[in-house]
Every structure is written in structure tokens, then in C-alpha cells.
Amino acid sequence: MPRRARLQDPSAPSAPPDALADRLHSLAIHLLRRLRTQDLASGLTGPRLSALSVIVFGGPVTLGDLAAAEQVRPPTMTHIVRALERQRLVRRDSDPADRRVVRLHATPRGRTLLVEGRRRRVRRLAQRLVELPPQELRALEVGAEVLARVVQRLTFPA
Amino acid sequence: MPRRARLQDPSAPSAPPDALADRLHSLAIHLLRRLRTQDLASGLTGPRLSALSVIVFGGPVTLGDLAAAEQVRPPTMTHIVRALERQRLVRRDSDPADRRVVRLHATPRGRTLLVEGRRRRVRRLAQRLVELPPQELRALEVGAEVLARVVQRLTFPA
DNA sequence: GGTATTATTTAGCACTGCTAAACAAACATG
DNA sequence: CATGTTTGTTTAGCAGTGCTAAATAATACC
């Protein structure tokens, strides 16, 4: 029973990855644009929410490490942290061992607001996801997994 | 003939979609952060590139339609278009039929720059994609397809 | 013809991001 | 131990994106 496997070479991609890359890029832009409005509801913008998240879950962090984690320059992070400080969501201590560094930690209020803000931000998306048939939800999960690894590898530029 | 369907309710999702929503959100943020640096190489930022793309492929467009397509308010689009005009990438004509509207169309230079800029922007991502085994690439395509529909539905807020 | 609607611009604001340069503390070394 | 370098953060100033409110202009409606 001879099979005609040559007609369907499994190593040949069905489409040039450029098109997929473009599509993923566009998707990311539009997804964030649609979710962005929800930020304001919590009083926290995206970068602030993201920075707060690292502070809450990453324990006391120095400003420089936080900037690196958020892929942002220190002056930018100074600005963001200052805003979070004004809202009493984080506090800064000077490290007794090395008085150059600033150690950031979340206040209880910051902790609470993080959880609520994040949930709010993502709620609209989650609402659409529950409407999906299970196999599409699963496909999305698998795709997200693959993309996560791809993005991880993007960390080290070519 | 009583069936025990309750044991495996097919309408019950395997995992709470909140986690997936959060993950997709985070993925979008980090993907764009990683690709952002490439914008500068083309002299075009993300929103400008995106707007130019609509103008190039969407033929002559009014400013208002462009703003709607880009999910941005008209004043914001005025600003973006002004920058593209300064760079001689788009031109504006007043519509003879309705002199309130502005019709935007790309210059040849704008056309060229769009293609190059977009390719540059997405090149790093595409480079990572070709390294993927075919079935992962396929999974990513399917996931992107599902997500595109989800994002589409996000257009109409709950 | 007068009023309402529609399209765009102007003005002014907040946030995010950058670089360059200042500053302060810690480290290294001759 | 004094000097110079490195490291962490802040200050200053800029560009870009986004918003709303209000001005302006043209069209549509009654």
C-alpha cells in the first residue's frame, strides 16, 4: 500500500512566517488597544499596574532591578514609582547595607488594588473567552504556550 | 435510558479563562515591548506605521474613518497624520463633494517606507518563528485565528 | 433660512519612554 | 588613605501617544 507522502511534506511550512509574524504583531496591538480603557477604571495605567505587580509578587526590589524586569530605563521607572508612591501603593526604604539603592515594597493598599485592577483589566477578555467552544479555548491555550516560548527567545536580540 | 452526563459536562471549561486572559494580556505586552525598538530603525513609530498601512492599503481614506479604524479619537489621528505629512509619506486632498472631509492617500515614498518599515519591525519575530517545528507553527496559526475572532468581538464592549 | 449634525482642528492636559548629565555611595587600587 | 572608577538613582528636557473640551467649517434638515 504505497503512500504518496511526498505530496504533503511535513517540514514545509504552509505559509511564510512573515505573514504570521505580522498577524501576531497586529493582534497584540489591537488586543491591548481594546483592553486599555479598563486601566482607567482602576486608576492604574498599564505600566504602573505591571510595575506594581512585580513589586507585590517579587518582594522588596531595587529600582534598577525593577526597571530591568520591566524592560525600561531607570529614569522611566523612577517616574512610574513616584506615581505609585503618591497613591500610597508602594513605599521605599533605603537599604542599610548599600545606601545607594532604593528598596521598593507594596503597601497593603497596593496589594489589594493590584488584584482588583488586574482582574478588571482582563475581565472583558475573559468574558469573551468563556463563550468559546472548548476546543477553541484549548487551541488558544496551546498557541499561547508556543508564543510564550517565542517571546522568551526574543529577549536576546539577534 | 438515564445517562450520567453530569460527570463530564462538555460545557465546563478545563481551566478558568481568567488565567488564560491574564496570560494573553501579559504576552501581548511583552511581545510589543520586545519589538518596539525596531520601530526607530525605520523612523516610524508603531501608531504611525499602523496608520500608514491603512492609508496605503485602504486607498484614500477620510481622517475620521482612519481614526475609527485605528481605534483612536480624531484629534489623536490629526496629530499622527500631521507627522506623516511632514515626512512626505501621505498627502491630503479636500473632497470636492464634501468639503468637510479630508482624503488621505500615500505618496510613493510612503508606500516604499511602509513595506520596509513593517518588514523590519517584524523581522525578529519572524526569525524566531522559522525555528519552530511545523506543528508548533501550525498551533500558533490556529491560536492566532481564534484570538483574532475574540479581539474582533471585543470591539463591542459589554 | 435657521438650526442641528458631522468632520476636523486647536488647545491643553497626563502618561510613557528616551538620553544626557548630575550626584551620591561604594569599591578598588596604588 | 586618597583618588579614581563604577554603580544606583535622580533631575532636566525632549518626543510621542492618547484624551477631552471647545472652536470652526461645511452640510443636512425642516
Image (spheres, coloured by chain):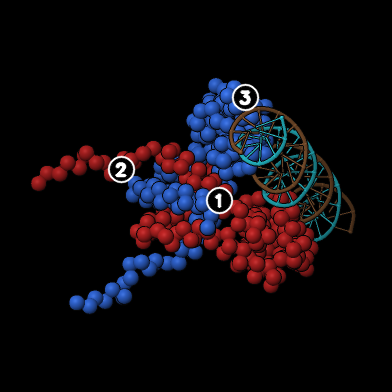
Chain colours: A red, B blue, C cyan, D brown
Tell me what residue is drawn at x 57 percent, y 48 percent: A33
Q: Residue at label 1?
A: A34
Q: Which of A63 and B157 is in front in this view?
A: B157
State the separation of the CA atoms marked 2 and 3. Answer: 52 Å
Quadrant (top left/top right/bottom left/bottom right) for the N terminus of chain B = bottom left
Specify whether B2 is left or right of A59.
left
Identify the image quadrant of residue B128. Answer: top left
How would you rate the neighbour count of disc 1 (Cα within 10 Å): few for under 14, some for 14-19, many for 20 or more? some
State the separation of the CA atoms marked 2 and 1. Answer: 36 Å
Report the amino acid beneath label 2. Ser
Identify the image quadrant of residue A145. Answer: bottom left
Identify the image quadrant of residue A14. Answer: top left
How would you rate the neighbour count of disc 3 (Cα within 10 Å): few for under 14, some for 14-19, many for 20 or more? few
Tell me what residue is drawn at x 15 percent, y 44 percent: A3
State the separation of the CA atoms marked 1 and 3. Answer: 31 Å
The nearer-to-camera label among 2 and 1 is 1
Q: Nearer the viewer, residue A121 or B121?
A: A121
- Where is residue B103? Give x, y as percent: 58, 27
Q: Which mark is residue B4?
A: none
- B115 vs A35: above or below: above
Q: Residue at label 2?
A: A11
Report the amino acid beneath label 3. Ser
